[in-house]
Image (cartoon, helix red, strand yellow):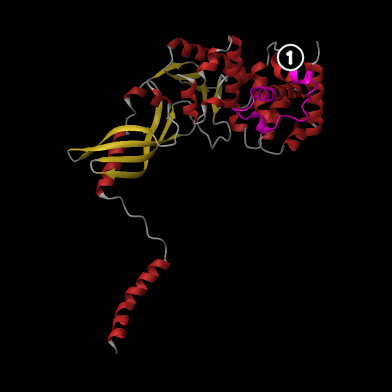
Amino acid sequence: MSPLRRLLVRALPLLLSGLLAGCGAPAAPAAPDTAERAVRDAVAAWARTPPAQLAGIPLEGWAYEVSAVRRSGAQATARAELHYRLTGYDTAPAGSAREVRLSRDGGRWRVTGDRPAPGAPPQLWDQGPVAVVRGAHSLVLGSGQDAGTLSAVAAEVERAVPAVSAAWPGPWAGRVVVLVPGSLERMAQLLGRPAAEYRGMGAVTTGRVGAAEAPADRVVVNPEGWAQLSSAGRGVILTHEVTHVATRAATSARTPLWLSEGFADWAAYRGGTTTPQQGAPALGRAVRRGELPGALPADGAFAFGGDPEALARAYEGAWLACRLIASRWGDAALVRLYEAAGREPLDVALRETTDTDPPALTAAWQASLRNDLTAP
């Protein structure tokens, strides 16, 4: 046998083992080394107790799940997901992507800082000390706000929750968490969106669609928009947002925005004396100019950051559509329509709950706009 052939024969088992390894299942990820395990253990030990500045917030299930560790000498950074619940309010853990910084001191790792992960929105406590106001139906958390403002927000929520329960008889917790940041810019940071999208708005609600997808509802107040509202306006805004919290479990991607936004306004105005001309000034101006809408507002009409006049017309038209349904077929039919529209196509839901269809509803809505918004 030639020397070359003998070399190939000796190498064959090694070649085969390499090929077989490549054809098999992927190799298991390497276990963390000793230093990485020490970093993970340090984060776990540090996270067993929430920070002292959160002592007034009712927290449970506080935990950091580390996904990656990066070390550089005596410094380390751990990427982690923070999980927690607000006791009595959250049905499942809220999540927040975090970056935990550590340093090695005397052979042991010690946490030196915690901040939102790059690109992740902050938590309210990242913006400064948090003050807490509790009510029978509310938990108001504020940063950079005076006690009077937080108490006023809590008082409005206490009035809004019973009003919403009267409009929405379906099951819901009957409790609301409200965040009041120090400025419009800080509100936008919490929501991870440009501040311009919320300018002029009093409040927004997070986590409205899909109970399993968004366990942590929060009403977030825009302090600048809030300051510009009358007492009645504040009541309408918070009742509208609390309605979104109450109806979230019945809301899905199927639910048209004209129905979800219109229902929230209907609940907010329900039982009051606001007339269509008073509550729909922008749409009234358009109708009197001869610009009657050709269809119920499309989902895109409710996008933030666009033409404020067009956005106002969309909300006003949605309210008047729901007002029409309640007046013609009854409050209970409107509630049943909302529930059905989250499960099935709108035409099916309308037929089952009102014995009508989208074209007929649109025609009736247009007629009501002519009648209600053009009268002297």
Horizontal side, residue 102 vs residue 286: left or right: left
Residue 338 in magenta? no
Residue 312 in magenta? yes
Residue lying at the far left of the rendered structure: 106
- Chain part drawn in magenta: 285-314
Disc 1 residue crowd, few under 14, some 14–19, many 20+, Cα 10 Å: some
User: How far across and how far down the image is residue 190, in percent?
Assistant: 47, 28
Looking at the rendering, which quadrant does residue 290 occupy?
top right
Horizontal side, residue 151 vs residue 291: left or right: left
| In the foreground, 267 or 106 | 106
| In the foreground, 80 or 182 | 182
Q: Is residue 357 visible?
A: no
Q: Is residue 235 above or below residue 3?
A: above
Q: Is residue 195 visible?
A: yes
| In the foreground, 311 or 275 | 311
User: How far across and how far down the image is residue 104, in percent?
Assistant: 22, 39
Horizontal side, residue 271 vs residue 293: left or right: left
User: How far across and how far down the image is residue 218, in percent?
Assistant: 51, 26
Q: At label 1, which amino acid type do we have? A: Gln
Looking at the rendering, which quadrant does residue 299 occupy?
top right
| In the foreground, 330 or 201 | 201
User: How far across and how far down the image is residue 105, in percent?
Assistant: 20, 37
Looking at the rendering, which quadrant does residue 308 occupy?
top right
Q: Is residue 190 above or below residue 68?
A: above
Give the residue displayed 68% in from the left and 12% down from the top.
Answer: 272
Check the picture and name the quadrant holding the N terminus. bottom left
Where does label 1 land, which residue? Answer: 277
Secondary element at tag 1? helix
Give the residue displayed 68% in from the left and 20% down from the top.
Answer: 266
